[in-house]
Amino acid sequence: EQDQENPSSYGDLAKQMIARKTSPECSSISDPPYDVDSVKYHLNMSYEEWLE
């Protein structure tokens, strides 16, 4: 499990996850079921509520 402790490997994994979530074809079978637009909407709502 040294790969998990390696910062460079963790950074690569994070980049892959970010790229996969931001890519149009992010609805692969291995990905959890989530709606990107819905997540963005809820994040924006939380941010707006926090501003008020």
Image (tube, helix red, strand yellow):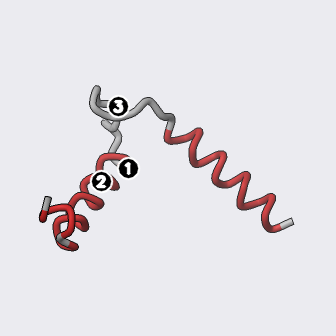
Find residue 51 and report its horizontal and vertical position in percent.
Answer: 80, 68
Side of 15 where 47 appears, left or right: right
Which residue is label 3 attached to? 27
Instruction: Check contact, mark 3 vs mark 2: CB within 8 A.
Output: no
Which residue is label 2 attached to? 19
Where on the picture, by quarter, is residue 44?
bottom right
How many angstroms separate mark 1 from mark 2 (CA)?
A: 5 Å
State the residue at coordinates (13%, 62%): 3
Disc marking residue 22: 1
SS at badge 2: helix
Local crowd size for mark 1, using a 10 Å CA cut-off: few (<14), some (14–19), many (≥20):
few
Task: Return the residue nearer the eye: 7 or 1.
Answer: 1
| Screen quadrant of the N terminus | bottom left
Local crowd size for mark 2, using a 10 Å CA cut-off: few (<14), some (14–19), many (≥20):
few
Find residue 11 and report its horizontal and vertical position in percent.
Answer: 25, 67
How many angstroms separate mark 1 from mark 3 (CA)?
A: 11 Å
SS at badge 1: helix
Disc marking residue 44: none
Q: Which residue lies furthest to the right in this view?
A: 52
Find residue 16 and report its horizontal and vertical position in percent.
Answer: 24, 54
Q: Residue furthest top?
A: 29
Q: Residue furthest bottom?
A: 7
